[in-house]
Image (spheres, rainbow, N blue to C red):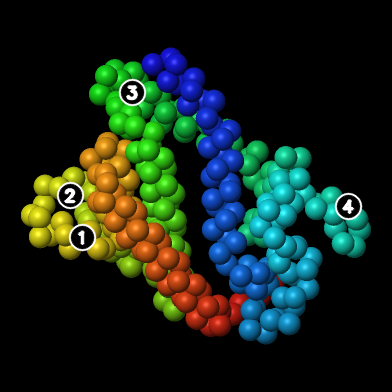
Amino acid sequence: MTTFIIRRLLLVPVLLFGVTVVIFGMMMLLSPTERSALYIRDFPKNEAALPGIIKQYGLDDPFYLQYWHWMVGRADPVSGERKGGILFGDFGFSRTASEPVVTLIKDRFPNTLDLTIWAVAPVILFILFQRQYFVLPPNPTAFACFLLSLILAGLLQFFISYAMALLAFWVLEVSTYIFIVFAFEYLAGGHLFPLDILPPALQKVLAFTPFPYEFFFPVNIYLGRVSGAALLQGLLVQAAWVIAAYLAARLVWARGIRRYSAVGG
């Protein structure tokens, strides 16, 4: 068990790097114009300012260059000083809170650490007492497919949640719609019970919806319960749903940003 924990701790830097690349890559799915629109308050009236914002922040640079600037910062085109760079402790400026992100983290970190300790301690105890029931994937191929499916599941959940949140462009209260989608995710995604206890006909119907691919399908890959042609078909269907959710999110964003306006300072 100690070896298992040490291995997982050693994988933390790799995991953090992978997570940042995936999240940064998801942001790159938005065009430079869409990302630059977040820097202005009234998009329709200030649309002419977008090219300057894109140039100032390098939003049209290649992916690897933008990621590098995010890590180490970039020179300001006017003053020549370095701005940004998380490796230098500069996490940017929060426009919502009107103060540096580092300051926000310092103010909230003690409470976060306290809550984390109280939340993680019972989980560690549970793992120690139930360690004989923890299993690993049957082979490296299954583990690799599990990681791929896990990434696709994360993208699928992100795009669905993103599209639902964008309904705020049209309605004042989106929590009801989000609750309905979450209910389907929990019931039809295998969160509450394994889907293989359902009638076979219903399982076949659910297999062509996005919900099982957010949780149930990746878990089945990890346990080695799906392989061969069924595994390939599942990954293809999961990838197709990711693409469909992405296109839907892009469409909702494009329609919504045209309706957005803000007043005040």
Q: Nearer the viewer, mark 2 or mark 4?
A: 2
Residue, disc 2 = 195
Residue, disc 1 = 206
Q: Is residue 180 visible?
A: yes
Q: Considering the image in quadrants, where does the N terminus appear?
A: top left
Circles 1 and 3, Cβ within 8 Å, touching? The answer is: no
Residue 88: image x %, image y %? Answer: 76, 40
Q: Is residue 111 visible?
A: no
Q: Amino acid at mark 3?
A: Ile
Q: Nearer the viewer, mark 2 or mark 3?
A: 2
Extreme-right residue of the structure: 79
Work out how far the residue at label 1 is from the one at label 3, CA to CA, in angstroms: 32 Å
Within 10 Å of disc 3 (Cα), the crowding (few <14, some 14-19, many 20+) is few
Q: Which corner quadrant of the image does residue 123 belong to? A: top left
Within 10 Å of disc 4 (Cα), the crowding (few <14, some 14-19, many 20+) is few
Q: Residue at x 68, y 53 (%)?
A: 64
Residue, disc 3 = 127
Asked if residue 241 lies left or right of residue 14, the reply is left
Q: Residue at x 41, y 40 (%)?
A: 144
Residue, disc 4 = 81
Work out how far the residue at label 2 is from the one at label 3, CA to CA, in angstroms: 25 Å
Ranked by sequence position, the earlier of labels 1 and 2 is 2
Circles 1 and 2, Cβ within 8 Å, touching? The answer is: yes
Residue 133: image x %, image y %? Answer: 25, 24
Work out how far the residue at label 1 is from the one at label 2, CA to CA, in angstroms: 9 Å
84, 26: nearer the viewer: 26
Residue 82: image x %, image y %? Answer: 84, 50
